[in-house]
Image (tube, rainbow, N blue to C red):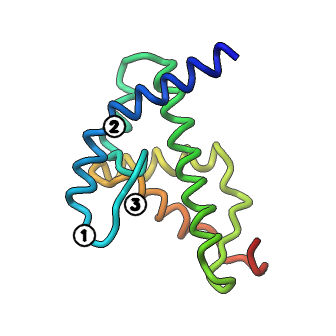
Amino acid sequence: MRQLLIGLMMIGFMAGITGGAAAMAQSNATTQEIKGLGALTCKDFMDTFEGGNREVQTILAIAVISWVQGYASAVNLENDSSAYRDLTTMDDEYTADRVESLCMQNPNAYIVAVARAIYEEMPLSNQTGV
């Protein structure tokens, strides 16, 4: 329980760090608002892994992976059945690898753009949704 509370406090700490990026992303948004970790730039995310606290790095990585997977799930729930994506292969390892690769290629991109790109890589499903 103590570790869970520490983890939640660290996420709160990271939210404070990313607040500036979120404000910048919101002020530049034209057709949408970006909230939470989606407003973090790839550069800011990747810079976290240069030195620094390993525990914070792990928590931020888990949070971003979860955010990307949650984004994909939410888009699936909002799409009609013809645009439903099969997220079966979008496990933690796949998501982490794709986030890292896309962020290295596009350091100025926001995590929300990376999440969208990963979502669009997923194959269309032959199911009708949830």
Q: Is residue 117 above or below residue 95?
A: below
Residue 12 % position (x, y): 45, 29
The image shows residue 117 at horizontal and vertical percentages of 47, 64
Q: Residues within 10 Å of mark 2 (few under 14, many from 20)?
A: some
Q: Please, what is the three-letter code of the amino acid marked with disc 2? A: Thr
Three-letter residue code for mark 3: Ala
Q: Nearer the viewer, residue 24 or 48?
A: 24
Callout 2: helix, strand or loop? Answer: helix
Q: CA distance from mark 1 to mark 2?
A: 20 Å
Q: Would you name the residue on which mark 2 appears?
A: 18
Q: Is residue 127 left or right of residue 43?
A: right
Find disc 3 in the rendering and name its residue: 113
Proximity of marks 2 and 3: CB atoms separated by less than 8 Å: no
Mark 3 Cα-neighbour bin, 10 Å: few <14, some 14–19, many ≥20? some
* Cα distance in 3D space between marks 2 and 3: 16 Å
Query: Residue 5 at x, y = what percent?
Result: 60, 20
Residue at x 25%, y 47% (from the top left corner): 23
| Callout 1 amino acid | Thr
Q: Residue furthest top?
A: 2
Q: Residue at x 41, y 26 (%)?
A: 13
Tell me the residue that label 1 is attached to.
Answer: 30
Counting residues from the start of the chain, the first of labels 1 and 2 encountered is: 2
Please state, as top left, top right, bottom left or bottom right, where the C terminus lies in the image.
bottom right
